[in-house]
Image (cartoon, rainbow, N blue to C red):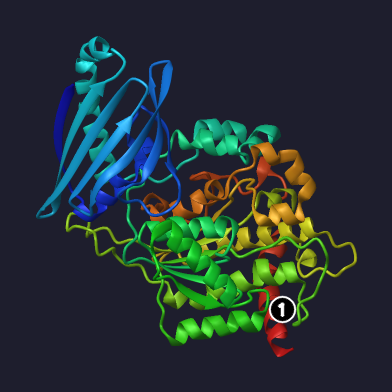
């Protein structure tokens, strides 16, 4: 048996440190030997939670299964791990001292199958690794990340069509993940309004944001969807305090009523996430005379963002220590767009399309292109208002919308599509990480700012950009009169 002990002091609360370290999926962020880490089974992290971790030792990789055997929030975690070669017991204890947290770590390694001699020879390497691990953990918990930038790898990919499209697949997500900086921030005290939260990447984002402690208000179309969503989030996170607002965002009177409810209640928010969407293959008008893609994908997020601006108030997390309290976070608007917009140049005549020549994919892409343009306009207009506005592209994800509306595309790309969680990752990062608050007016894919126009194509004409808001305002007002 080999026993190793280390301790560190970090300028973070016990609360933040405990919840970061108890979720072993975060190991990939700060342990260089961890290639992948996944939770086994559903439910919130706690006593009995199991994780599958893949470790690398030079050219050789091997799996380990960890189980949390002791779990006292903000105080103590005990983990037991098993591999083909050894078992391990990790004990991590936390104590708060003023503005810092003391973390003590003890690892006991027990060899199996006659690996005693090999393990004893590795004791020096284990001690060296423990030293490096503590340095990485200190950095993950307290270092401020710089503004996100485009990697040289993706800058090169953006210059070639097939490489750029490859970034949309799961390959792009897995490759990009290797370069991500740690995200140890918690969201207790942060109020987030998220639309389209009952399925797909919206639900995946809601689950992760709830697990991070956010105060969520989710916009869904019906009480049935609210009940189903609440049950799913509770099963995954243990949270039963999620708020819901009912609204059909393809109906402008519903959108306006939602605005009035939130405004009258003075429901302030730190983050607004415009995610609700659908791709409609068949042309249809809403009861207010609007083409349904235009109403849902563009007019409602435009109206919500404009009308709720007074409610977007930057705040500080209650869990922040005084060492962090001088950091004033900014309120955030996150607009979910699509790679489909790369194929379209903004054309005001193609918004609110008639049935003549209608194609669902084009209508969808036009609206997403317009929302991307509005992201840049809002970012410039509100740059002195402590509000950052960014867009994100989730890549090609196997969402219910893709399954229903793009069956041929799904059949061709099924093996490379992202999961809902992978598609939602950048939404969560943009809402949770301080690094994301350093940028505004950008389009993100896999936590990196990317070009809004692939290969420089399909840049809109100045008159289309300048006339966009006037068109939306007139169409919204007309819809409310019907």
Front-most of 365 and 177? 177
Front-most of 452 and 391? 391
**Picture layout, residue 269 above or below residue 436:** below
Residue at the far right in the pictured view: 356
- Residue 277, horizontal then vertical, whole percent: 65, 63
Which part of the image, by quadrant, shows the C terminus?
bottom right
Which part of the image, by quadrant, shows the N terminus?
top left
Left or right: residue 481 versus residue 380 is right
Q: Quadrant of residue 161?
A: top right
At 38% from the left edge and 61% from the top edge, which residue is drawn? 238
Front-most of 423 and 468? 423
Please tell me how many numbered marks the rendered image carries: 1
Left or right: residue 420 versus residue 140 is right
Left or right: residue 54 versus residue 186 is right
**Picture layout, residue 453 above or below residue 112:** below
- Residue 85, horizontal then vertical, whole percent: 33, 20
Residue at the far front in the pictured view: 113
- Residue 100, horizontal then vertical, whole percent: 14, 50
At 18% from the left edge and 22% from the top edge, which residue is drawn? 2
At 70% from the left edge and 72% from the top edge, which residue is drawn? 295
- Residue 165, horizontal then vertical, whole percent: 67, 38
**Picture layout, residue 38 above or below residue 327:** above
Q: Is residue 112 visible?
A: yes
Residue at the far bottom in the pictured view: 481
**Picture layout, residue 256 above or below residue 241:** below
* Residue indicated by mark 1: 475
Q: Quadrant of residue 464?
A: bottom right
Residue at the far left in the pictured view: 97
SS at mark 1 in the image: helix
Left or right: residue 145 versus residue 134 is right
Front-most of 116 and 478? 116
Task: Tell me if mark 1 has few (under 14), some (14-19) or many (20+) residues whose alpha carbon lies within 10 angstroms of its own.
Answer: some
């Amino acid at each position: 048996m080999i026993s190793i002990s280390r301790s560190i002091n970090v300028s973070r609360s016990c609360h933040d440190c405990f919840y970061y370290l108890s979720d072993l999926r975060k190991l990939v962020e700060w342990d260089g030997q961890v290639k992948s880490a996944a939770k086994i089974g559903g439910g919130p992290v706690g006593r009995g939670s199991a994780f599958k971790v893949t470790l690398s030792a030079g050219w050789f990789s091997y799996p380990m299964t960890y189980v949390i055997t002791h779990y006292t929030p903000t105080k103590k975690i005990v983990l037991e791990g098993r591999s083909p070669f050894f078992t391990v017991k990790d004990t991590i204890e936390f104590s708060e001292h003023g503005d810092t947290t003391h973390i003590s770590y003890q690892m006991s390694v027990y060899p199996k199958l006659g690996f005693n001699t090999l393990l004893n020879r590795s004791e020096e390497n284990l001690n060296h690794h423990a030293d490096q691990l503590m340095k990485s953990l200190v950095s993950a918990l307290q270092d401020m990340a710089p503004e996100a930038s485009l990697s040289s790898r993706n800058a090169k990919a953006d210059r070639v069509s097939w490489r750029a499209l490859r970034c949309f697949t799961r390959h792009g997500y897995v490759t990009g993940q290797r370069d991500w900086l740690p995200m140890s921030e918690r969201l207790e005290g942060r109020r987030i309004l998220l639309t389209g939260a009952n399925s797909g990447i919206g639900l995946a984002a809601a689950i992760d944001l709830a697990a991070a402690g956010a105060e969520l208000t989710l916009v869904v179309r019906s009480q049935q969807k609210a009940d189903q969503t609440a049950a799913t989030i509770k099963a995954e996170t243990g949270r039963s305090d999620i708020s819901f607002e009912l609204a059909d965002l393809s109906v402008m009177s519903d959108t306006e009523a939602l605005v009035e409810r939130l405004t009258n209640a003075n429901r302030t928010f730190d983050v607004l996430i415009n995610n609700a969407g659908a791709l409609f293959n068949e042309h249809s008008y809403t009861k207010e005379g609007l083409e349904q893609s235009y109403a849902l994908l563009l007019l409602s997020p435009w109206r919500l963002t404009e009308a709720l601006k007074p409610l977007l108030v930057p705040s500080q997390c209650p869990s922040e220590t005084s060492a962090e309290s001088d950091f004033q976070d900014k309120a955030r608007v996150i607009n979910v767009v699509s790679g489909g917009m790369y194929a379209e140049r903004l054309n005001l005549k193609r918004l609110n399309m008639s049935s003549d020549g209608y194609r669902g994919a084009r209508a969808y892409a036009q609206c997403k292109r317009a929302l991307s343009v509005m992201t840049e306009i809002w970012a410039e207009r509100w740059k002195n208002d402590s509000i950052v506005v960014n867009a994100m592209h989730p890549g090609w994800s196997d969402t219910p919308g893709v399954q229903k509306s793009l069956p041929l595309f799904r059949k061709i790309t099924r093996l490379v599509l992202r999961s809902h969680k992978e598609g939602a990752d950048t939404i969560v990062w943009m809402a949770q990480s301080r690094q994301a608050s350093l940028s505004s007016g950008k389009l993100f894919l896999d936590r990196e700012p990317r070009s809004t126009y692939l290969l420089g194509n399909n840049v809109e004409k100045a008159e289309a950009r300048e006339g966009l808001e006037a068109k939306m305002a007139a169409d919204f007002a007309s819809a409310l009169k019907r």
